[in-house]
Image (cartoon, helix red, strand yellow):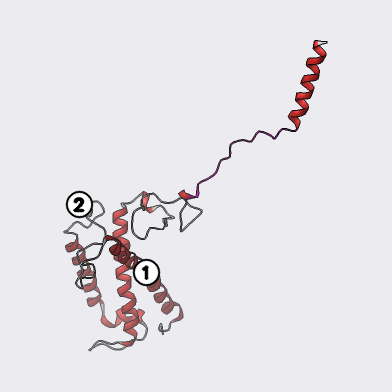
Amino acid sequence: MKFVSALSMAAVVGSAAAFAPPATAPKTTTSLSAMSKAVPFLEEPKNTKGYVGDVGFDPLAFSDYFDIKWLREAEIKHGRTSMLAVLGFVSQQYITLPGLQPIADSNLAPSAVGIGPMLQIVFWGGCIEWWTNKGKITMETMFEDPDRVPGELGFDPMGLSVGKTQEEKDEMALKEIKNGRLAMLAIGGMIHHNWVTGEPLF
């Protein structure tokens, strides 16, 4: 009799188990906080954090192999040079210096002035690079001083940063970086426009 009762109880428990909710395995989720804002399907680069203008864009992982300060310095300098280049590329089409012949296609301007002035640009650019870095122009030596901030050369003739808070300075730096990035794309587009079409920009 006891055996029958035990068997009946086991059957009842088994029937009740059929209606019980199944055991759920712990869910595994991937945190989106580790993903790049600019390229959501790539992981966020860890070495660019803390820099003004960082949006997690480093698809080739340059910051994992090169000094991030050196990379930032290169970006800022190329951005500044490109902003000047865009201005010069457009102005050259409408303004001709005394003693030079007018050339509508800015890509042909170097041939108008000759090799001498072009080499002077390279020479004086190198001098400025040497002077502003106190002769330390390699990636290994440029930032031996830990307090050296990329892009800050002490050049502010108009006093735009005087009396500004750090937050206001960061905002100005962000504007410079964004305009520099845009200018790098712009000068590339302008040069290729003239090259592909064979016509002036405007």
Residue 66 image offset from top left, x and y in percent = 33, 51
Main SS category, magenta section:
loop
Placement of 16 over or under 114, stated as above or below: above
25 falls in the magenta region: yes
27 falls in the magenta region: yes
Residue 145 image label: 2
Residue 22 image offset from top left, x and y in percent = 69, 34
Q: Is residue 24 left or right of residue 198?
A: right
Give the residue type at disc 2: Asp
In this rendered view, identify the residue nearer to me: 63 or 15: 15
Mark closer to the chain start, 1 or 2:
2
Dot 2 lies on which element? loop
Mark 1 crowd level (few <14, some 14–19, many ≥20, 10 Å Cα): many
Placement of 202 over or under 167, stated as above or below: below
Q: Nearer the viewer, mark 1 or mark 2?
A: 2
Magenta residues span: 19-32
Disc 1 and disc 2: Cα gap in Å?
Answer: 29 Å
Dot 1 lies on which element? helix
Residue 74 image offset from top left, x and y in percent = 30, 61
Residue 64 image offset from top left, x and y in percent = 37, 49
Residue on which disc 1 sits? 184
